[in-house]
Structure formats: structure tokens, C-alpha cells
Amino acid sequence: SAAETKAPAPKKKGGIDYSKFDKIEDSDDEKPKESASAEAKAEKPHCHNCHKEITKPLRCGVCKKVEYCSAKCQKDDWPYHKRVCKKIEPPKAKAEERRPSPPSEERDKKGKEEEKVVETEENLTWYRHREWKPQEGKQEFKPTQISDQKAQEEAEAAKPAAGSAWNKAGTWEDKDVTERAQKTLKERLGESLPSVDVGGGSLSCEGVDAVEGDASKPVIRGKQRHIFDLSFKVKYVFKWMESDGQRQAKGEVEVSDFTNDTFTEGVLTAPVLRISFSDSSKLEAARRKAVEAALGASSWPPDAGTLMHGVAAKMQQWAKEYEQDS
């Protein structure tokens, strides 16, 4: 409420006029303080996104600090709020109180125990040390018989690791033998193979061509591996007799994905075989079907009595020689 106005000062007797003091205002310290009858209204919460006043605020479920007017505002503000939003950590447990140091008497007693004097009666001298151990008895080392199996294991362990002389640690070492592998495979498969009688004619192999791929002998953890992935083409010719004389039709079987796991026991990694006829027009449908069956390229391993059965035997023989060749 406003300060009450002062009543005009009465004139004193004796002719002195005090009315001029009526216009003097009171100082701030003397002014009556306004009554705080009406309590200040509590500030209403505002939305952290749209800054509107909220009647029913929705708090952030992680930090419990910011409030929103609706779920939409919370969703819109989350890409920015998540940078500073932190989960409320529980109060840390109070550290255990430090144990009081032992009294000085105990420390003195402990120090005296550590500095015991040990006297040797033999030399009639004394010495002191902090740790005293009784003299250990003499150890006897008796010879033991080593079994043959243990001796063999120790001999194998003492063998030098595979690989070059500079690679004594037995780490990774790769030796490329692609050129030699292609040459030896071509020579092995180029050897004569038995012909197969089929469809009134004879089916025989004319050699191997287009040997491609990679071969290497890496040393991994002191053990040598034999890795290869090769492909080649087996040339064949089918000859038969007709009224006008002997006729022939040539073709080839393309063998790919011939790897070091092809003949590994328990591992099924069959190579891919594809048959192609260069002179297919010369053969009748029935005779061509019989020739394809005699090739044995429809399954792996090839059936006995087929042309590819002999080729597979040569492939297996070469794979063994490749592993033995260092």
C-alpha cells in the first residue's frame, strides 16, 4: 500500500511557521515497507522445445531435468538434447575410513623382531639379516629312463622349422611354384590314357591344354603347406567307321577349381567339369549322348570305365607328388 500522507504540522506559538517541512519526503530507510501479503506466484514450467507454459509436464526419462508439453516436442528436441543428456548416477559409497596406524610400542616391537641376531657356534661369530631360512637338504638327481615315444617327441621338437634358413622363427613365408606346378601337371596328364569303346567307335584323350592357376608352398607357424588352384582342358576325340570311311568328332572337357582339397579325405571340394563339342553336327543325338556318358564328366569322382576316371587318377597322382616335392 502507498505511504500515508503526512498531516500539516501545526503552527507553533511564537510566530514560527513549520509548514515548509511538510513537503520534505522521507528517506528510503524511513519509508514503510510494502506488505508481502500476496505471495509471489510460482513460476510455471516451460517446454524445452516450444517454450510454452506447461500444466502437465513430461520429463526426460534419462536425465529427469528437462520438461516438455507433449511427446511430439520431446521427439523433435531429442536430436539436440541427447548430446548433453546424461543418466543420473547414484551417490558413490563413502570410502572406508583409514585404519589407524599401530601404536609406537608395536612398531618398536616389530622392528626388534626383524633385527634378530643369529649366532653361529662353529665360527664363534655373529651376523644379522632380515630374513632367515633354514638350510635346505641336499637334492639328489637320479637318472631316469626315457621311453622311446618321449625320445621321438623330443627329437621332432628339436627339428628345425620348415622354410628358409633366414626364417628360423617359423613366421610367414611364401614360395611361389606356379610355373613348375603347371609344367608338371601338363606332363603328368599328357601321358597316354586307355581309350573307351562306345557307340560303335573309340573315345580317346589327345592331351591337355590351357593349364592356368596359382600354386604356392607357404610356411605357417613352422609348418609347410601345399596350396594350389588350377584349371585345364582335356582334349578328346571320338572315332567311328561309316560306309564312306572313318569319321571323327573332337571336343574338350574344361576342368576348373582343381585345388589342394580336391582329394583331401573328408573334404568335399569337387572340381567343375564342362563338356564342349567342336564337331557336334557330325554326331547323331543318340551317339552324342553315349559319348557324353563315356566321358564321365557328369559327376565327381568319375565312374570307373570312363575317360575322366583315368584323368582323375593322374590328377591324384600329381597332387601326391606336389606335396612330396619340397
Image: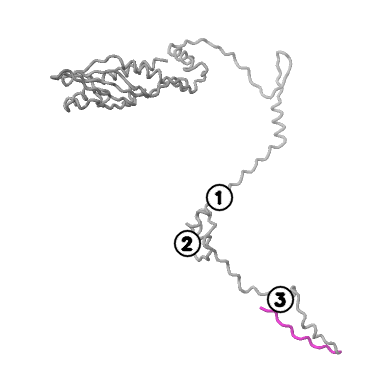
Residue 294 drawn at (x, y percent): 21, 22
Callout 3 secondary element: loop
Q: Left or right? Give the position of 252 relative to 62.
A: left
Distance between the alpha carbons at the discs numbered 2 and 1: 28 Å
- Which span of residues is magenta-colored? 1-14
Callout 2 secondary element: loop
Residue ID at (48%, 23%): 172
**Crowdedness of circle 1 by 10 Å Cα count: few (<14), some, many (20+)?**
few
**Crowdedness of circle 3 by 10 Å Cα count: few (<14), some, many (20+)?**
few
Between residue 52 and residue 318, name the one nearer to us: 318
**Crowdedness of circle 2 by 10 Å Cα count: few (<14), some, many (20+)?**
some
Q: Main secondary structure of the magenta part?
A: loop
Q: Is residue 256 above or below residue 322?
A: below
Q: Which residue is mark 3?
A: 32
Q: Is residue 86 above or below residue 237?
A: below
- Place residue 186 in its image quadrant: top left
The earlier-in-sequence mark between 2 and 1 is 2
The earlier-in-sequence mark between 3 and 2 is 3
Residue 70 is marked as: 2
Distance between the alpha carbons at the discs numbered 3 and 2: 47 Å
